[in-house]
Amino acid sequence: MAGTPPDDPYDHDLSAEDPEEFGGPSELDRQPGRPSAEVYRRRRLAAGLAALVVLALLIGLVVWIGSLLGGSQEDPDDAPSPTVSSSPAASPTSNAPTSPEPSTEEPGSASASPTASGTQSPSPSVSESGSASASADATASASPSATPVAQDCQPQDLSVSGATDQTSYAVEQDPVLELRIENVGEDPCRANVGTSQQVFTVTSGSDRIFSTEDCQVEGEDVQMTLEPGVQESARFTWDRTRSAPECAEVSSTPGAGTYRLVVSLGEITAQPVAFTLQ
């Protein structure tokens, strides 16, 4: 009929349809939900991390306990023992802070390298050359009664001489002064060769420029057995300064020119040795 509109194919009540067909609550929706696969993966990951942490703690605990047990069972004999070194009695060294240390030489084999700092109060000590070890070996193999006792050296038994490592020195060079001692006798003899007996003096004409006895605080006595024909030496590096008795202050410094070294050991004084400062 003309007055009745045609039925709209899309005009109907959806509520009357099957609710499951149109997304309504299904049987599964009405049941409690189950965890998804992502949730399971997260749980497994968390459990794995927790297991790793526990394992690391256990390993650390085992290592710590092992270190405690191992440290308490160390053999005390394995600890490093102190080593003792000894030097020949014929090679004493001075403990004075201002002391140069001389070296021992065979005749004709003097070293030009200094063994002392350039202070005004040398404390060189004298050490024997190769004869020291030979003497020690002989003493060890021979009976005490077979070892001869050296007598004191007489002035005629000793030869004392001075020397320098160069004959001329540039402005920046400090002369190395040397005192040489030799037993010119036929038998070994003992002498005091310590710094209490050594004197290094530098002069220029009649002017006394420098002497080691001016500022020496304490001299050292060193008794040494001198073998015949063996030369001993003590060295002192002069820093090109002036000195005065009782270590009085001196403002002037030596200039260029010719100087002379005079060394002495006790009452024995050597001949002067000339050298030049530029």
Image (spheres, grey):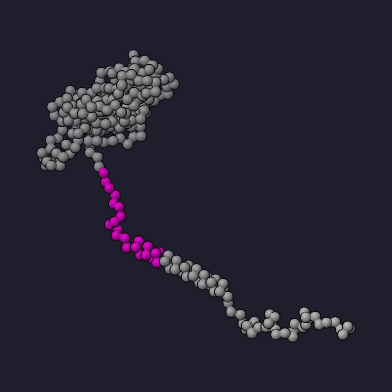
Q: How many marks?
A: 0
Name the image quarter holding residue 138: top left
Is residue 196 shown above or below 272?
Answer: below
Residue 242: tell me if it is visible.
Answer: no
Would you identify the image quadrant in which residue 36 lies?
Answer: bottom right
Q: In this view, does 257 lie above or below 2?
A: above
Q: Is residue 242 magenta?
A: no
Q: Which residue is drawn at 65% across and 83% down?
A: 26
Per the rendered image, the range of residues in magenta is 62-85
Q: Which of 247 and 21 is in front in this view?
A: 21
Q: Where is residue 4 in the image (x, y as percent from the top left)?
A: 86, 84
- In the visual, does 198 lie left or right of 48? left
Instruction: Specify whether 65 is left or right of 15.
Output: left
Compare residues 27 and 51 and report the one nearer the observer: 27
Q: Residue 124 location in percent, x, y?
A: 30, 31
Asked whether residue 149 is in view, the answer is yes
Residue 272: percent from the left, percent from the top? 28, 18
Please give the name of the residue rendered at 24% of the width and 40% of the height, measured from the top-left corner. 87
Q: Nearer the viewer, residue 162 or 164?
A: 164
